[in-house]
Image (spheres, rainbow, N blue to C red):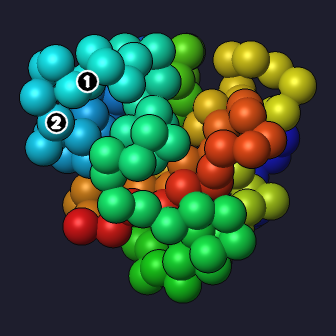
Amino acid sequence: MPFSQELQVTESPESGAVFRKAWEEVFAGHLSKKEKEQIFLDQFLWHACSWGVTACATGEEAVALFMQQDKDRCIIFYQFIDKAYSVGNAKNLALTDLPYDSFNMDRNDLYVMDEKQKWTFVMTHEEQCGPYFIAL
């Protein structure tokens, strides 16, 4: 899926693990190791939302909050692959710009994180789970 031309996108083929670790520290850092194990956070970071242990918005509210954010630069990454994107000039970043593919297991658990790690938007492979939005 091509990004909108106004977006300044840099692909990082091997940065996903770094961003997943940062996401866990920032948005699930309040959980103990035992709590993380109980919600299977090692399987999906978004379990912090679906298990109700992190305050978040869901569904249409999550989408609305994502769209309302002042977006300068964002990071987009996935649960299972290490490809990531740094997106500059992101003020108009919309759902249709996100490289999400509901039929591709590598690309259907997607995380968007503000470069300053103040908020995150998550799309999952589960129809009944998400999307989620967390703001700190």
How far across and how far down the image is residue 18, in percent?
29, 24
Instruction: Give the total number of marks visible in the rendering.
Output: 2
* Res 29 seen here: yes
- 3 vs 74, left or right, is right
Dot 1 lies on which element? helix
**Residue at x 55%, y 15% (from the top left corner):** 81
How far across and how far down the image is residue 124, in percent?
66, 38
> Hey, which quadrant is residue 97 in on the image?
bottom right
Image height of 132 relative to 126, above or below: below
How far across and how far down the image is residue 65, in percent?
53, 77
* Residue bearing the label numbered 1: 36
How far across and how far down the image is residue 85, in percent?
52, 39
**Residue at x 28%, y 15% (from the top left corner):** 37
Q: Are marks 1 and 2 in contact (CB under 8 Å)?
A: yes
- Extreme right residue here? 103
Dot 2 lies on which element? loop
**Identity of the amino acid at label 2?**
Leu
**Label ID, residue 114:** none
* Residue bearing the label numbered 2: 31
> Hey, which quadrant is residue 92 in on the image?
bottom right
User: Does label 1 or label 2 sit earlier along the sequence?
Assistant: 2
Image height of 96 relative to 22, above or below: below
